[in-house]
Image (spheres, rainbow, N blue to C red):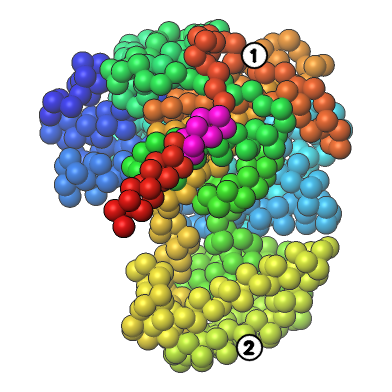
Amino acid sequence: MHDRLNLAQQDAVNHLRGPCLVLAGAGSGKTRVITQKIARMIQTGLEPKRVAAITFTNKAASEMRERARDLIGKAAGEVLICTFHALGVRLLREEGSILGLKSQFSILDSDECLSLLKDCGATTDAATARQWQWTISRWKNEGLSPEQAAAQATDEGEREIARLMSLYHERLIAYQGVDFDDLIGLPLRMLKNHPEVAQRWQKRLGHVLVDEYQDTNATQYELMKLLVGSAGNFTAVGDDDQSIYGWRGATLDNLKRLPIDFPQLKVIKLEQNYRSTSAILRAANNVIGPNPKLFPKRLFSELGEGEPVRVVDCDHEAHEADRAVARIQSLRSTSVQKEWRDFAILYRANHQARVFEQALRRAQIPYKVSGGQSFFDKAEIKDLCAWFRLWINEDDDPAFMRAITTPKRGIGHQTLAQLGDLASKYRLSMFGGLFSGSLEGIVSAKALGSLREFGRYVNYLQYRAKQTEGEEAAKAFLMEWLKEIEYEKFLQGAEESDKVAAARWSNVLDFCDWMAGRCGGRIDDATGANGGSERKNLLEVAQTITLISTLGERDQDPNMVTLSTLHASKGLEWPHVILAGVNEGLLPFRTDEDAPASAIAARIEEERRLMYVGITRARQTLAVSWTRRRKKGREIVAAQPSRFIAEMALDQATAREDPREKLKALRAEFAKKAAEQAALAAAKA
């Protein structure tokens, strides 16, 4: 079993009892260690259902599940492999009644929560409401209740947000709803306040593995502690050098607390990197060196020295983009085996992408912007999907809440809160509560009429959708429905810009065309591609709605150059990486000069970790570029290279390069060979 594991990895896999911290450097095979450890525990007698592996993204959980399946077969299906938030959902579905939650509680998305906050604060200003949302989210991630937030508020603004947090909390309770942060906060409160529930889950889970441990926030750490109890059978896998999410609550304090809270903690360091060359790792080690160390480590590689890390100095942003494109063309032209997908351009902030997009388009190089919004994440598409979900499942409360309020139908939040109370009392879905006789004495006659009219309309749509088969019929029905609910008018009223409203309506029409194509068998259900054959009615198409969101992701590895922020690049790797915009003020990002010295130092340390993450994304070659001038507003200002370039401690004799000159030489060489071949062909003729 250990043939593919080095000694440190074997040590981590074989430590089966008690607390364990695996410090997994970049590219050191942490996922392999986690999955091998799952297999090892099951082979030594632990039931698969008593193993939990927790990570931060659905993608990471899916990859882990696949690897576990390769090792242990069907038993992997019994292992609880999920995100922190999915675990929170499971805890609340099974145990939430102790908090007054029914098992079919609603999970509100960010837009729905924003709308709720706007109503609580009686504002239409989305920017203000978004600030409230961020502050409330931060407080929740710190484990604060509305009362605790109010008690520690430092000014009138924070006191007002704490008051809104209380109103917001009351609305969520009335709607039998939770937000994303509640999926951690509520299970934590439940386990703290109800020891019998905590003990039940501690017995249920024999070992808990936590991936990307450095990204945990305060509430996630407390939740983990309560799940493992005093026995402390857990494995935390992470890297303090890759902690880059402090802005969303992640804290290195969780690493500091582990040896204090669990004195028997075993620390194992994975320092062998299987991704990058020695030249790249040397630059990474040098950059991260100045940061204070909780557990010192130094990455090494057996992949050879490799190409030197290059520093590319540029005149301005457009020049930087041109040189990046020239480097990609130069590297690709040296080997027919290099594809566009082998290249990535990484940068600190989203706004930096534009100039690289323009340069790649001019060169006719295909590219994708990583982390861009999926078509199926757009608000207008989610609105339509909520209606479809309600057609197929009347008990889907989140879909009910979105459909009945989008577009608005004159049904107020007080009415919906009263409906939510009734549904909770009688253990009904909110849709089921519409036709309860008990509702008649709770809401006004006018509100009752509006609610039941909505219910009858949904039932009518269900019936029509079931009868609608074929592309033309489906398209006609969908357009008729959108006209009846005045959705285009709703979009026009929701946007200040006619152009934005028109673009959103165009997305709706494209989506309806796609749905109709599925009804006609023109679009294949499994792949989303053209060429299907089986006709379906619209309700059958709606029943596959959960698969629709994966449509845009079906081509997981398109042959394109990747443009990505450094934050979005974490966990990914490419053979050839260009790290762009490495200037003071960008990387490290400018800091508030009036902030306390300790806060500035902490910010620089996190920015240094971000640089480290960028460097360690590269497998074979790395170029780091900076500009002498940058655009600031409408002015062009002088710019300086980032301090991190000097910290890489590169050999300056080999670090500088001009890809334009290299490309020019290659083109001259190709032209010479073409001329020689033409002359040879002419001579033969």
Disc 1 marks a residue whose amino acid type is: Arg
> Is residue 587 in view from this perspective?
no
Quarter of the N terminus within the rendering: top left
Residue 264 lies in what quarter of the image?
top left
- Picture coordinates of residue 53, whole percent (x, y): 33, 37
Q: Residues within 10 Å of mark 2 (few under 14, many from 20)?
A: few
Task: Kindly identify which residue carries mark 2.
Answer: 480
- In the image, what residue occupies the spot 47% across and 90% down? 468
What's drawn in magenta, residue-wise? 660-668
Disc 2 marks a residue whose amino acid type is: Glu
- Picture coordinates of residue 158, whole percent (x, y): 80, 34
- Picture coordinates of residue 6, whole percent (x, y): 21, 19
Q: Residues within 10 Å of mark 1 (few under 14, many from 20)?
A: some
- In the image, what residue occupies the spot 71% across and 55% down? 116
Residue 663 magenta:
yes
Task: Kindly identify which residue carries mark 1.
Answer: 643
